[in-house]
Image (spheres, grey):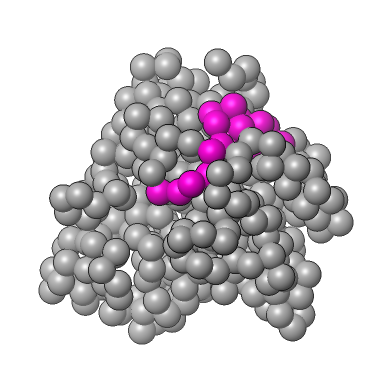
Amino acid sequence: MKRTGFLYDERFLLHDTGPGHPETSERLQAAYRGIEEAGLLSLLTRVEAVRTKIKWIEAVHSPRHIMRFEEACMLDMGEFDHPDNQMCGDSYDIALLAVGGILETVDRVMDGRLDNAFCAVRPPGHHAEPNKALGFCYFNNVAIAARYLQIEWDIERVGIVDFDVHHGNGTQRIFDQDPTVFYYSIHEHPSFSFPGTGHAFEKGTGPGFGYTLHSTILPGEGDKEYREALERDLIPAFEEFEPQVVLVSAGFDAHVDDDMSEIRLTTEGFSWMMKTIVELADKYCGGRLISVLEGGYAVQRLPELIQNHLRILMGMDVQ
């Protein structure tokens, strides 16, 4: 069985988005209860969050963005940059804890203490752009982890797989011109679905052309189309790119029971997709994979989806 890390910290629950907001602390609480009830906690290596150094945030975000977010929290403004981005006075500190915990997890995978890991963090990150918060996201967790891998661990090629049902506009923007990071996103498009970006023809710009790849899934589609897309797009792309580490933006909102999309991916479909990603990491990276929670708002489904996600990381059979 693989040594799988699990980043979770009760302080993540302090990021208060207010009544009726879909990105609620209940998501993490439900997932944690499900992991505990399934008897998986004792099989995981726990990682606790630590506050990151600001220099790692600045590797992705402008100092002005960081300062504006800190000030908005200090003034308890209630939202930041967009009405969707509800927050509280603790949100800035919790976002720093989330990033710091992820970077600590990266260190443990890179120095061999862990084989892979899942980071159950709040707030999420893949919509956050260098100068703007968007879609419940303030700092781009996965993008910061990618830059950290390059700067701190001398990694030349990072592969990012984003299966959140919403396109990771922030991650794409950050690496759009960068040939050292391959960004793959599979998401719902075209539809009413936020943020309305992520067209199939977007492949990166300048030296980064060819290092962004989108598989677009139509409303009403599901397991069959996801399987076809990964086999057609992701597998050959990674065969050519040969990533040294894989980062996963793990959003579970493409599930058929999730009201945030019209995609009909089943629990079994999610499991097949994650098994495929783990196999790619085993083939090209010696298994080095760090998965970070993004979306997923069907609270009744998150426990089983994250249980299966962890079982696959550990090399166990999925129930």
* Residue 16 seen from this side: no
Q: How many marks?
A: 0
- Residue 60: x and y in percent read 50, 73
Rendered residue at 65%/24% (across/down): 315
Q: Is residue 95 magenta?
A: no
Rendered residue at 47%/32% (across/down): 306
Quadrant of the drawing holding the C terminus? top right
Magenta segment boundaries in residue numbering: 260-276
Give residue 158's quadrant in the image: bottom right
Give residue 266's quadrant in the image: top right
Q: Answer above or below: position of 208 versus 242.
A: below
Q: Answer above or below: position of 218 versus 319.
A: below
| Depth check, front residue: 151 or 119 | 119
Left or right, 187 with respect to 84, comes to right
- Residue 63: x and y in percent read 39, 82
Q: Is residue 270 magenta?
A: yes
- Residue 148: x and y in percent read 57, 63
Left or right, 213 with respect to 107, comes to right
- Residue 163: x and y in percent read 58, 48
* Residue 33 seen from this side: yes
Rendered residue at 68%/71% (across/down): 202
Left or right, 291 with respect to 203, comes to left
Rendered residue at 62%/51% (across/down): 217
Q: Answer above or below: position of 77 versus 38.
A: below
Q: Answer above or below: position of 2 versus 72.
A: above
Quadrant of the drawing holding the N terminus? top right
- Which residue lies most toward the front here? 220
